[in-house]
Image (spheres, helix red, strand yellow):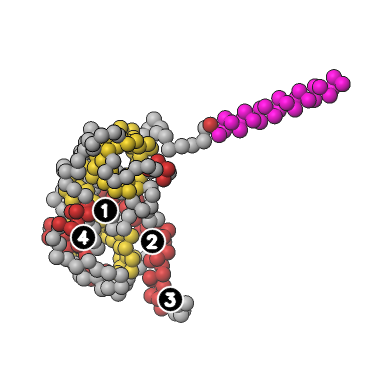
């Protein structure tokens, strides 16, 4: 009988230990909370729009001391539930977490009363409607008009110089403060350069265009490029005159607007076929190098098949 009770007690202790371990593990599940290495900012602003993806909110926010001035920016959240109950026009207070490679809103709450921050320059949509640009935005399948810019070495070039290659272009400005916007575009292009340097050498040209020509000179772009490039053989960083840059951004529908020394902007990444036609445009930062690589290989398939003597499927 004593043995029976001893075994029963042992089983009870074992079960208690297992339950405790499960509870402890559950309590320490990773979350989107900040770590000691992150920058954490408490910010007030006004919601301008909630994007259809359910995880992006555009906010006109107050100045964030030591990080960025008052401006309009799109911010992401890790979980859509963070934005539940919010609407355009709401005055809000939110916690912004910024890491080396990412940024997000970890919590956000609606404030009572009137908005505390006004969008001084309006929304990007208003900027687009009032820009008065005469450049006709190109559509998928159309021939991309030739254009000229200046590379990071100060040498002029034209788009037609790469006829016969697939061209992937994107837009950045080097002072962009959020790591998952312009810096992410550059990190993604670094991944593409690595992939195609091995798989399709000489078949793909990457082009990063600054839409901040007053600040991003060829010399500065060359310094910036060294952070990301393996070499400049198949990846060019470019700037130009204001007129040249305005023309190219207009072709691809990029919207941008100066704001307190920085630039409110959206994103565009485009794929141009070897014969100069627009294949696809990515309009956000959610694309992956794998996704672009797959589409590039599909675009190059006829040329690759011809070179190998096989018939494309």
- The residue labelled by disc 2 is 292
Distance (Cα) linking label 4 and label 1: 11 Å
Distance (Cα) linking label 2 and label 4: 20 Å
Magenta residue span? 1-26
Percent of width and height locating residue 120: 16, 43
Sequence-earlier tag: 1 or 3: 1
Q: Are marks 4 and 1 in contact (CB under 8 Å)?
A: no
Percent of width and height locating residue 239: 18, 56
Secondary structure, magenta segment, majority class: helix
- The residue labelled by disc 4 is 249
Distance (Cα) linking label 3 and label 4: 33 Å
Q: Is residue 165 magenta?
A: no
Q: Where's the N terminus, which quadrant?
A: top right
- The residue labelled by disc 1 is 266
Q: Is residue 8 magenta?
A: yes
* In the foreground, 222 or 215: 215
Element class at badge 2: helix
Q: Are marks 2 and 1 in contact (CB under 8 Å)?
A: no
Disc number lying in front (1 or 3): 1
Disc number lying in front (3 or 4): 4
Sequence-earlier tag: 3 or 4: 4
Percent of width and height locating residue 29: 52, 36
Q: Are marks 2 and 4 in contact (CB under 8 Å)?
A: no
| Quarter where residue 157 is shown | bottom left
Sequence-earlier tag: 3 or 2: 2
* In the foreground, 301 or 306: 301
């Amino acid at each position: 009988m004593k043995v029976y009770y001893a075994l029963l007690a042992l089983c009870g202790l074992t079960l208690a230990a297992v339950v405790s371990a499960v509870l402890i593990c559950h309590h320490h599940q990773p979350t989107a909370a900040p770590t000691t290495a992150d920058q954490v900012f408490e910010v007030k602003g006004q919601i301008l729009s909630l994007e259809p993806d359910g995880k992006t909110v555009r906010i006109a926010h107050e100045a964030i001391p030591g990080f960025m001035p008052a401006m309009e920016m799109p911010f992401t959240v890790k979980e859509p539930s963070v934005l539940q109950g919010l609407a355009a026009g709401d005055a809000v207070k939110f916690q912004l977490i910024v890491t080396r490679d990412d940024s997000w809103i970890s919590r956000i709450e609606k404030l009572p009363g009137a908005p505390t921050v006004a969008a001084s320059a309006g929304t990007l949509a208003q900027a687009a409607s009032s820009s008065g640009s005469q450049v006709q935005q190109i559509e998928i399948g159309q021939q991309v008009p030739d254009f000229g810019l200046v590379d990071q070495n100060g040498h002029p070039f034209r788009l037609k110089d790469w006829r016969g290659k697939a061209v992937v272009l994107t837009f950045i400005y080097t002072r962009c403060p959020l790591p998952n916007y312009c810096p992410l575009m550059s990190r993604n292009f670094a991944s593409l350069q690595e992939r195609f340097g091995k798989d399709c050498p000489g078949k793909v040209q990457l082009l990063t265009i600054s839409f901040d020509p007053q600040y991003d000179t060829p010399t500065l772009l060359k310094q910036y490029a060294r952070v990301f490039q393996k070499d400049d053989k198949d990846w060019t960083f470019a700037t130009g005159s204001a007129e040249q840059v305005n023309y190219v951004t207009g072709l691809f529908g990029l919207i941008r607007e100066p704001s307190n020394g920085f630039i409110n902007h959206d994103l565009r990444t485009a794929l141009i076929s070897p014969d100069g036609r627009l294949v696809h445009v990515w309009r956000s930062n959610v694309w992956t190098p794998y996704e672009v690589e797959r589409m590039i290989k599909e675009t190059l398939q006829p040329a690759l098949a011809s070179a190998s003597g096989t018939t494309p499927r």
